[in-house]
Image (cartoon, coloured by chain):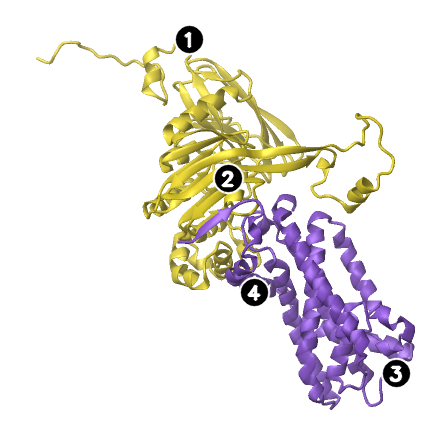
Amino acid sequence: MSELIIEPGRAEKNYFGDIWRYRELFYFLAWRDILVRYKQTVIGIAWAVIQPLLTTLVFTIVFHRIVNLTAPAGVPYFLVVMAAQLPWQFFSTSLGAASNSLVGNANLISKIYFPRLIIPAGSVVTSFVDFLITLGLVALTMAWYCYAPDWRLLTLPLFMALAFAAAFGSGLWLCALNVEYRDFRYVVPFIVQFGFFISPVGYLSAKIPERWRLLYSLNPMVGVIDGFRWALLRGQTALWWPGISISITVTAAVCASGIWYFRKMEKTFADVI
Amino acid sequence: MSDTVIRVENVGKRYRIRHQAERERYVALRDVIAHKFRIFPRGQAGCGNRRSEEDFWALRNVSFEVKRGEVIGIIGRNGAGKSTLLKILSRITEPAEGRIELRGRVASLLEVGTGFHPELTGRENIFLNGAILGMSRAEIQRKFDEIVAFAEIDKFLDTPVKRYSSGMYVRLAFAVAAHLEPEILIVDEVLAVGDAQFQKKCLGKMQEVSRGGRTVLFVSHNMGAVSSLCHRGIWLEAGKVADTGPTREIVDAYLSANSKAETSVTELSGLGRIGDYGRKLRIERLEWVSGLPLHHGEAISARLDFRVLQDVDDVSVGIGFSTLEGTRLLTYETDFQDGYRPSLRAGKSCRAEFSVPELVLAPGIYTVDIGSRSGDSYGLDYLPGLCHVEVAMGKKTPGYIVRQGAGVRMPGNCKILNGSSPQ
């Protein structure tokens, strides 16, 4: 028979074992979010296709036709934007979803015990489903342009993991802060909007002047987006290693500190939410 | 091996209350910044903006033990710490001090239908809710048919629950919960919802659970449910254990301590209602004009203040008295004598007055139900088991009635005709 001891500060121990034990709940919550997402919509899951397609189109028109930015030789600008739009959209939707996830599930948190970490994790996973749909869309677009990727495509999962870690880490910070300070629900749309301009979504990061490049790379999405472009577009956009390594370091730091802060705060979630 | 499955030792829970920030439920960042960067001290106490923090112990030095198979009723007034205790036992929040040992799988049911999603169908919600309550997918699949049969909703299995009536919703939610098979079950006030028949079914199911050797901790305001279900009672008062012992004794002690303290005015507007009750018409206040306790055989008068929120026709309101087990003994309704049922416009505040020349309830403790309906049967507002009142001996009450317990006692022409034995 299992024995459980409840004491102040006790939850620290076997924390990750608990998460494993509650994995079924994790699946169910993610499943619920996916199921609910497009209920009572007319075109349903088609939204996951229309959104990235239209934004990519608009960005291509704005940055390519109006601002006159150019892509590396032989690569359609539409694909350049699409390859960046893919991780960026994932990052921004999961940031929005994760930061509201705890407050949105307040009734669960104040009535049932489970490792709270599975809630923001679940919302990032839900956004990942949209990401996979967009990935399929990218594949179709590349087929349309008769643009075949090369061996670099095999590195894509690494950059996907990096994108996931960046979204998860910042999501943890924001959702934990949002429980206590509801100000953060106003901060998130701002971060997303701001982040769009300081991430190379509509343009290439090579456009950034050399001396600013290191500072620019502190944004974890810079490394992610550059990596996606490099992996999808046959390396025609060069990978800048110092930048990538900075992005990876920052992502790891955000992720680790996010988990630390979340765990520090989670004991009081039920009391303040 | 000992038979103790729950051991609670000196558990305490502290909350920090911020007096000024009470108007907002959450802290805004600006407050924290303003607080941290306050360079100039704010002068003396009494300055309007001063924020004071204070520790509030919702629970302190609470200790008790529960043996396997016991059903424990936890009673106490609102704010006595019952819910906090359950939250600590179900690990939702951490205690500030003390230690608890739990042996066995714990499931807690602090609310029916936790995590129900209105957009999902009944079928989907059974799986979701089951998982939230700690059942595995295989377990839910195995019990699925049983749950559906218990809830009596098989026709609506694939309808989103937002289209369910409140009764169906509660039945489905409880059905899932009733099929949990934990070693320790923690239940909070969930029986307050649902109709009487379904309540009985749920009580039966819970009794079945405890006969299976499982341990149940049960919080309720329904003293009838507590006394018929629980073996032992724990009475919490202001965060401390006031008394423990056999249920009947504890319930009696609790009731007699509290019915005297009961104020003659009860505010009702903030109380939760089941389903649609209170949406068109809301009863806001109950006042015992003649004071408490009530007295057998003497005049009582009471007032109900209510607000009409939507136009309603043929309104009547009433007060009912029930035994602690929930059986209605006596009802007073405004349309009983002359059938007068006014139609009322939205926005109106009304008052109903009840005046009874002679109360027929014998001395004892009763629960009060109040409600309102439109026409013969359409319920507008309903608050069953709202509070307890004590009926004390009146001036004319013969002493022997008290010993016979509660019920309705009124004069009639009843006589034993002949004292001698039959010939």
Q: Do the numbered discs 1 and 4 sit on residues whose CB atoms are within 8 Å?
A: no
The nearer-to-camera label among 1 and 4 is 4
Residue A8 to residue B368: above or below = below
Q: Secondary structure at mark 1?
A: loop
Q: CA distance from mark 1 to mark 2?
A: 40 Å
- For image coordinates 58% across by 53% down, the residue present is A12
Q: Which residue is mark 4?
A: A31
Label 3 secondary element: loop
Crowding at mark 4 (Cα within 10 Å: few <14, some 14-19, many 20+): some
Q: Position of residue A163 (x, y in %)?
A: 71, 71
- Same-chain status of marks 2 and 3: no
Q: CA distance from mark 2 to mark 3?
A: 71 Å
Number of residues whose C-alpha sits closer than 10 Å to that of mark 3, classed few (under 14), some (14–19) or many (20 or more): some
Q: Give the Cα separation between the discs numbered 1 and 4.
A: 67 Å
Q: Amino acid at mark 3?
A: Thr
| Disc 4 residue type (three-letter) | Trp
In the picture, the disc for residue A18 is: none
Task: Tell me the residue that label 2 is attached to.
Answer: B378
| Position of A257 relative to B397 (above/below) | below
Rate crowding at label 2 as few (under 14), some (14 to 19) or many (20 or more) other CA atoms within 10 Å.
Answer: few
Answer whether residue B303 is visible to the viewer in this image.
yes
CA gap between label 4 and label 3 equals 41 Å
Chain with yellow colouring: B
Earlier sequence position, callout 1 versus callout 2 = 2
Name the image quarter holding residue A166.
Answer: bottom right
